[in-house]
Image (cartoon, rainbow, N blue to C red):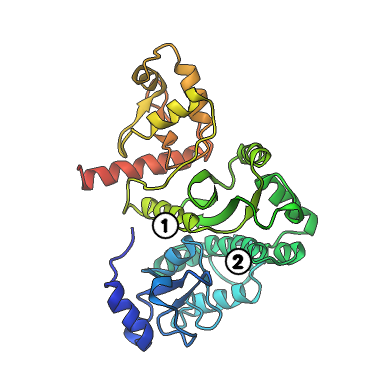
Amino acid sequence: MLLTLPSEEELYAALLDRDPQFDGTAWVGVKTTGIFCRLTCPARKPKKKNCRWFATPADGLAAGFRPCKRCDPLMNRSDPLISDLITALNADPAYRWTESALIARGYDPSTVRRTFKRNLGMTFLDLARQRRLAEGFVTLQDGARVIDAQVAAGFESPTAFRDAFGRWLGVKPSQLPENAYLKAHWFQSPLGPMIAVADRHSLHLLEFADRKALPKELQRLYQKVPIGIGCFDLHELVTDQIIQFMNGTRMTFEVPLTLHGSPFVKEVWRRLQTIKAGETRTYGALAQELGRPSAARAVARANGANKIAIIIPCHRVLGADGTLTGYGGGLWRKDRLITLERSFLKKDPS
């Protein structure tokens, strides 16, 4: 859960004054640069409208921001373990850290895990993975050469990076249009990296990056409308609301959607959106609500074909016996989402 922060006015005043009492208790993300900092950072101060505020470094990373290289918001110089590992991570963000690598450096992995979780809100291995993926994707979004993005992401070769990116978007990076109507934006959520595809006005696709069906979904969408890489204001809206949801501070969404499917499939997806957080349905019950009691299997297929995760809550549909059934993002995520929503409902039944 997010910690309580002071008002934006107080935080922005502290940022302008570089107030040391906020060091280690609040962080600022700058929308125009994609970087987050300490409030005491010596860098040039952003405009207030371009600021986002975080209670932990993990929140900044989860929102897709990269740590500032000047003030190093991840560093905790009072703890030599954190200081040593963050220094090593900064020296080589592409390095693939493992528990064996921590042991080789003289650390107990469980101690490292607890220390980072307590101080930064996430484990060191999760932090290292996020840094590697984010560096690669952001490098590519900034228009750098493919080889630069490959190196930043830590892939073993340019070919490996092209293949990985091709699996996500169905096209090689060199073939992506610069002024595409649709743009794909990568961001890190508390449940793993996600890809959002949107135009300036509505969301077309939102999936976890490791979903097996993602490549085919992107290829079908690309055949209709070419997809580039970048970030519209709508991507920021989606990112903000998804992270708020996963942190338990939002249970509804205000995101315009464009649905790609047959009339029946769209009807199922719209019905899914009427299932409130904390509630679940079976496929049979959903078919009954649609006035098609014999169409439970068709409803299940439409549910599985959903291309907008979380916002169209296909995770709220269970098997006939109430057990968890297939979920493209993984059953462990489905369980986490349902548990989150039920706990939220207990706190606020309204």
- Please provide percent x and percent y for residue 326: 50, 30
Residue indicated by mark 2: 103
Residue type at the position of mark 2? Ile
Q: Work out whether residue 97 can be spotted.
A: no
Q: Quadrant of the N terminus?
A: bottom left
Q: Splitting the image into 4 quarters, where does residue 214 fall?
A: top right
SS of the residue under disc 2: helix
Residue type at the position of mark 1? Asp
- Please provide percent x and percent y for residue 55: 36, 69
Examine the rendered structure and indicate whether residue 2 appears above or below residue 70: above
Q: Earlier in the sequence, mark 1 or mark 2?
A: 2
Q: Quadrant of the C terminus?
A: top left
Q: Nearer the viewer, residue 340 or 140?
A: 140
Q: Nearer the viewer, residue 160 or 81?
A: 160
Seen in the image, is 51 located left or right of residue 80? left
Q: Residue at x 31, y 65 (%)?
A: 3
SS of the residue under disc 1: helix
Q: Nearer the viewer, residue 176 or 122?
A: 176
Report how far apart the C-alphas of labels 1 and 2 lie in the structure: 37 Å
Q: Residue at x 59, y 52 (%)?
A: 184
Q: Work out whether residue 295 can be spotted.
A: yes
- Please provide percent x and percent y for residue 83: 52, 79
Residue indicated by mark 1: 240
Q: Residue at x 43, y 38 (%)?
A: 312
Q: Residue at x 38, y 29 (%)?
A: 271
Q: Nearer the viewer, residue 262 or 289?
A: 262
Q: Splitting the image into 4 quarters, where does residue 17 fall?
A: bottom left
Q: Residues within 10 Å of mark 1 (few under 14, many from 20)?
A: some
